[in-house]
Structures are given as C-alpha cells and as structure tokens.
Image: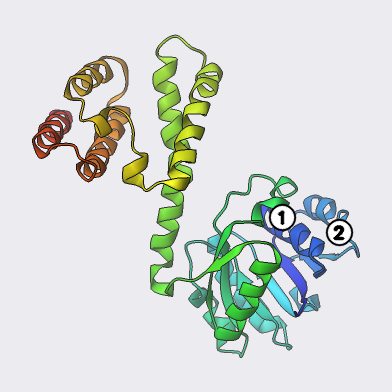
Amino acid sequence: MNIFDVSIICVGRLGGALALALSKQGYLIRELVSRDQEKAEKIADLITPRPTILGENNLEKITASLIFITTQDNEIERVARNLADKLEDLPFVFHTSGSRSSEILSVLSREGFEVASFHPLVSFSNSISGVNNFKDAYICVEGDSEAVAIAKQIVNDLGGNPFSIEPKFKTLYHASAVTACGHLIALLSVAIEMLAKCGLEKGEAKQILLPLVKSTINNFSTQTPTEALTGTFARGDIETLQKHLKTLEENISAEMKEIYLLLGKQSLELASQNGVSEETIQTMNEMLSAKTKVDN
C-alpha cells in the first residue's frame, strides 16, 4: 500500500477534516494552503509532524506528491491554473467538488498532471468533529485512471466506500445529494413551522419530530422507498387528505402548502406500487391537482 504525502488547498470544514483524517491514517500532511491563517494554525496544531502553512500566493512552495483542492467550486479552475503555472513537478491533483467533474482540472491534464474528483457524500459542519465522517461514507471518484486508483485507495484507507459515475452526470449526482441532504433540512424546517403553529416553541417542535424522523430513516435503511412509506398517502386515506388540505389552507403559507402538494403527488406514486387502489390514487391526485390549480 502506498502512503502519499499530501497538501491541501483551502482549510475549510472539509479540507480541515480531510487533513486530520489522512494524518491519522499515516499520510504525511506537508502543506496547508489557506487565506485564514488562524484557522489553518488550529488544524496544523493537531497534526504531527506539523505541516507548513502557506498563503495562496505561495503555491510554488508546495512539495507534496498529491494535492487536494477543497475550495469553493468557483475557485477550482483558478487554483488549477495557478498550479499549472507554478509547479514543475507533476503531483496528482484532486478536487472535492460534488457538482464539477474532473474535467474542470483540464488545464492541469494538458500539462501532464494526473487528476481526479474526490467527493465525500456526507455532511461536514465542523473540521474536528468531521474527522470520523469519512468512515462508512460513500465517496464518488472519477478522472484519470491512475489518479482514480489512488483515490480509491485513499477512500479505503479512510474506511469509506468508493464509487464512480460518468463525468457528464456529476451535476445530476450533486442535485440528488442536495435533495437528500440540504432539501431534507429545508423540509424539516417546514414541518417544524407547521407544528409551531399548534402553539409549540420551535425548539420543542424539533424535539417532538426528531424520533419520528429517526424511525423513518431507520425504516428507509432496510426497506425500499415504497415499503418505508407510511401515513396518509400510504393508506390511501382520502378523508384525512381532505382535512389536511383544509387546515393547510387556513394556517400556512402558499409556498409551504405547495411543498405538501408536490410531495403528496410523489407519495402517491409510491403508494400506487404498494397496493393502494387505482381509483383511490386517482381521487387523491385530483384533490392535489385541484389545489395546485387554485393556487396558480
């Protein structure tokens, strides 16, 4: 097994967590490149041997054989151009964007660098607590063949699960991730808002809903979406849907109601695969569509 020496450009939540996690697995972290000296110092203090901290104008001082670019998406190409201009050796270069493919590093490929994308499909809200998030996570890798082989080894070293998709689908892959993660939080905020309308504090509403959400995720972990679906739409409960639509009309915003209506239609798609009669599905769909048309 090869253990690489690594430099990380941008010591944010993911970059910091990656530096710490790799160092725990025996990788030598040579340089941390950051605009935020204080943040980089905090991460460097936790790594032995302590990496050198560089500013973004000192990329020519990078000595590692593997570089991770963990910047925001709109900065990746600029950083890649700077690396192509300033580095004479040809280290492997990975970026960690979910929405961009390895093709965004084409300026490096043309100069002979081996490149890949390396995107952990997991949330990082904090560098230090995020160190353990790589374990069991699925990490999407694609790019040049040798770079992908190394990326897969790194994923395995971190205790994760590597998988690959075609570069042309990278943005769709990322949209799926946003729907499952960011949109899930947005959806839960809507549910909290609804429950708060019942006279509860939002913090209390969150705590009340949390066991329900956890039980749903637990069900989903062992069942298909069709099998895991429960509630009004899974039962084909027309009367309860009527009551829902009436109370939503009276108590929440049109935007929140629209979320309920659209998700209701998707729930009916699942319910139709799980034994709810075609007649019931059609009736409930018409009820949801009628409300949507009125709103529009």
Q: Is residue 179 left or right of residue 83?
A: left
295 to the left or right of 3: left
Tell me, for residue 122, which label it has, or none. Answer: none
Q: Relative to 296, is 14 above or below?
A: below
Pinpoint residue 120: horizontal percent, then vertical percent. Answer: 58, 60
Q: Quadrant of the C terminus?
A: top left
Above or below residue 278? Residue 109 is below
Q: Nearer the viewer, residue 262 or 274?
A: 274
Q: Which residue is mark 2?
A: 47
Q: Secondary structure at mark 1?
A: helix
Residue 257 x %, y %: 28, 28
The answer to whether residue 270 shows anywhere in this view is: yes
Task: Look at 51% across and 34% down and name the residue there.
Answer: 214
Three-letter residue code for mark 2: Ile
Indicate how the structure is coloured in the image: rainbow
Q: What residue did someone put label 1 on?
A: 17
Asked if residue 11 can be seen in this view, the reply is no
Along the viewing direction, whichever of 288 and 35 lies nearer the viewer: 288
